[in-house]
Amino acid sequence: MTKKATLEVNGQKYEFPLSTGTENEVAININALRATTGGVTTIDPGFKNTGSCKSGITFLDGEKGILRYRGYSIEELAEKANFLEVAYLLIFGELPTKEEFDKFHADIKSKSIVDDDIRKIVDAFPKSAHPMGVLSSLTSALTAFNPTSVNVDSEEDMYKSVVRILGKFPVLVAWTLRKKEGLPLDYGDNNLGYVQNVLKMMFKKPNEEYQQNPIIVNALNKLLILHADHEQNCSTSTVRIVGSSHAGLFASLSAGISALWGPLHGGANQAVLEMLEAIKEDGGDTKKYMAKAKDKNDPFRLMGFGHRVYKNFDPRAKIIKVAADEVLEDLGVEDPILDIAKGLEQEALKDSYFVDRKLYPNVDFYSGIIYRAMGIPLDMFTVMFALGRLPGWIGQWREMRLNKEPIGRPRQLYVGETYRQFKPLEKR
C-alpha cells in the first residue's frame, strides 16, 4: 500500500505520495501540488525543508554527525584514500580500480595545459583583486577556449570534460595565488601526484627547488577530501540550477564558485581568521572573548564553532583536528594568531556552555588554522575550498544532467501592491 500524506486547505483534503530514501528519510512529494489544489504553493525561505532533487551522491545526517560519499564514511575515506580516488568516486559512483585510477590520473595530466592566452586574462587583474573573483572569471573564460558543448548522452564526451576541468582547475588556483604574490606562473610537474603538484605549482620559488613535506601533503589531501561534497548546499544547488538550464559545465562551475565566495558559505574559514586577527588586536584575551560569545546582549559571534547542519558534532572537524595538530607541530610555527586559536579551542572543549550546546570547533576553524600555518594568504582560503569542492560540483552537475532534471524554477508568494491604474507623468 502506497503511503500518503494528507493536506487540508480551506476545508478540502488532498493526498500526496511519500517518497522514502535508502537511509529511510521520508519526503512528501508535492510535485502535483499546484495542479491538484488550483494554484496553492508552499513557502520555504532558504529551502530548509524542501528537497530539490533525488541524489545518490552524498548522505548527511546532522543529528548523528554522519557524512558519507556514495555510502563510504568520511572517516574511512580521509584515512585511506587519496583525493583523486574520492573525486572519481563522487563523479562516477564507484572507487576506481588500479587500472581506472592510473588512466584517470594520466588523462587529467594530459589535459592540464591551460591555453597561454589565459595568462593575458590573469595579467589584466590587479594584484588587489579578490582571488575568488579571479578564479570565477578564469573558470568561466575556459568556455571560450573549449567552445564545444558537452554531449551528456555520450560517456566519452562527459569523461573528457571531467578530466579537462580536473586538469586545468588546479593550474587556475595556483595562478590565482602566484598572481597575488607576484610570482611567475607555473604549470607544475606531471611526475607528481595530484595534491603534490598543486602544492608545487602554488609555492615553488623560481630560484630554488621545491621540497615536498609529507605532513603538509597529507593534511591538504584530507582537507580536499573533507570539502569534496556536502549535499545540496548553497554552491552545489547553484551549480545544479544553473546546469538545469543546460548551461555548460564550466559556466555552471563558475556560478558555484561565486556562490561559495560568500562569508556564510565557503568564506567561513576566512571569517575565522579575521575574528582571530581582531582578538589579537584587542590584546589576545581568549577568556574575555569566550565570555562575550556567551553574552546574548553582546554582538560578538564566535566564528568556526557549531554548524547549521550538524547538531551534535562536525565529523570532518574530528579528522582535521589531528592533521592541524600534526602540521603545527611539524612546522613549529610561532604565530600569536594560531596561539589564540588553540586557546579558544581549549576553552570551548571544556566550557559547559559550549559543550552543552554542542558548539564544538568545526571544519572551518581547523582548515583556517592549517592554511594559515602553510602560508596561504587569508583571501585564498576559499579558493582552496573550491579546489576541494570541485569533484562534488562535477558529480552533482553530471547527475542532474543524466537524470534529465527539469529547469529550476522556484515559486514565490507575492506580497506586493495589487492592481494600480497607471497615471501619466504630469499627474503623479
Image (cartoon, rainbow, N blue to C red):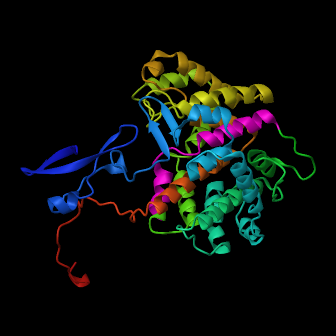
Vertical order, 227 against 114 (above or below): above
Q: Give the residue displayed 57% in from the left and 56% down from the top.
A: 394
In front of the other: 148 or 215: 148
Q: Which residues are magenta?
A: 213-242
Q: Position of residue 318 (x, y in %)?
A: 58, 27
Residue 110 lies in what quarter of the image?
bottom right
Q: Nearer the viewer, residue 314 or 108?
A: 108
Q: Residue at x 70, y 64 (%)?
A: 125
Question: Quadrant location of the C terminus?
Answer: bottom left
Residue at 17% x, 67% y is 418
Q: Can residue 71 be spotted in the picture?
A: yes
324 lies left or right of 246: right
* In the rendered image, the vertical position of residue 197 relative to residue 369, given as above or below: below
Reply above or below: 332 against 388.
above
Q: Position of residue 156 (x, y in %)?
A: 62, 65
Q: Position of residue 378 (x, y in %)?
A: 67, 44
Q: Is residue 261 visible?
A: no
User: From the image, which quarter does the N terminus lie in?
Assistant: top left
